[in-house]
Amino acid sequence: MPSQEHELVTEMFRVRPELAVDVLEAMNWQIPKYEDAVVVAGDLTDVIPTEYRADRVVKYAGADGKVVFAVIVEAQLGTDKRKRFSWPAYVGTLYSRLECPVLLLVVCLEEKVADWCCEPVVITDSDFFRMAPVVVGPRTVRVTARCWRRS
């Protein structure tokens, strides 16, 4: 059950939703111009769940069997604007589930697609919410293939 202090803090933002912008601007954040601020439900569960399915997920465990790292592997054959919204969901969901660092590795067969995938996913206009996938494309395939031959 939330404490009285917890409820007091959240109530301030319910009563005056602009307070969030005031606080962020006081911290030198650049906030886009807006006309209205509305408090909406904080329940982030989808009533009609969206299925997020990564192409492959690889978990890496230590000697004790505890997962220490995970990689989401995505094969990207073309540009797809929806990926800018689903990739952060993949990473966030797996990070929450496994409670360990997660990396998104995108493998592309065309350089144009690799260049598109290299662009960071910007959730807010700051480095705080910016996700840059690791991209393997035609320029890096020769190096990767050379590494595989040595194994």
Image: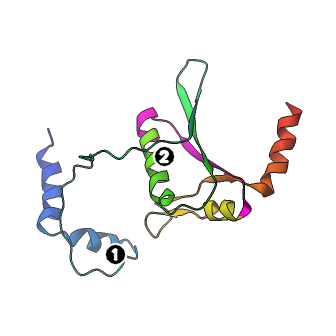
For the point 13% across and 51% down, the residue is: 7
- Foreground tag (2 vs 1): 2
The crowd level at tag 1 (other Cα within 10 Å; few <14, some 14-19, many 20+) is: few
Where 46 sits versus 41, above or below?
above
Quarter the N terminus occupies: top left
The crowd level at tag 2 (other Cα within 10 Å; few <14, some 14-19, many 20+) is: many
Under mark 2, the amino acid is Val
Q: Residue 25 carries which label?
A: 1
Labels 2 and 1: the sequence-earlier one: 1
Where 22 sits versus 4, above or below?
below
Percent x, y for residue 96?
Answer: 41, 39
Q: In the current view of this chain or complex, which residue is farthest to the front? A: 77
Percent x, y for residue 19?
Answer: 22, 70
Percent x, y for residue 40?
Answer: 18, 60
Task: State which region is magenta.
Answer: 95-111
Residue 28 falls left or right of residue 148 = left
Residue 42 falls left or right of residue 50 = left
Q: Is mark 1 on a helix, strand or loop?
A: helix
Percent x, y for residue 92?
Answer: 44, 46
Determine whether label 2 and label 1 are within 8 Å by CB: no
Q: What element carries label 2?
A: helix
Quarter location, residue 151: top right
Under mark 1, the amino acid is Glu
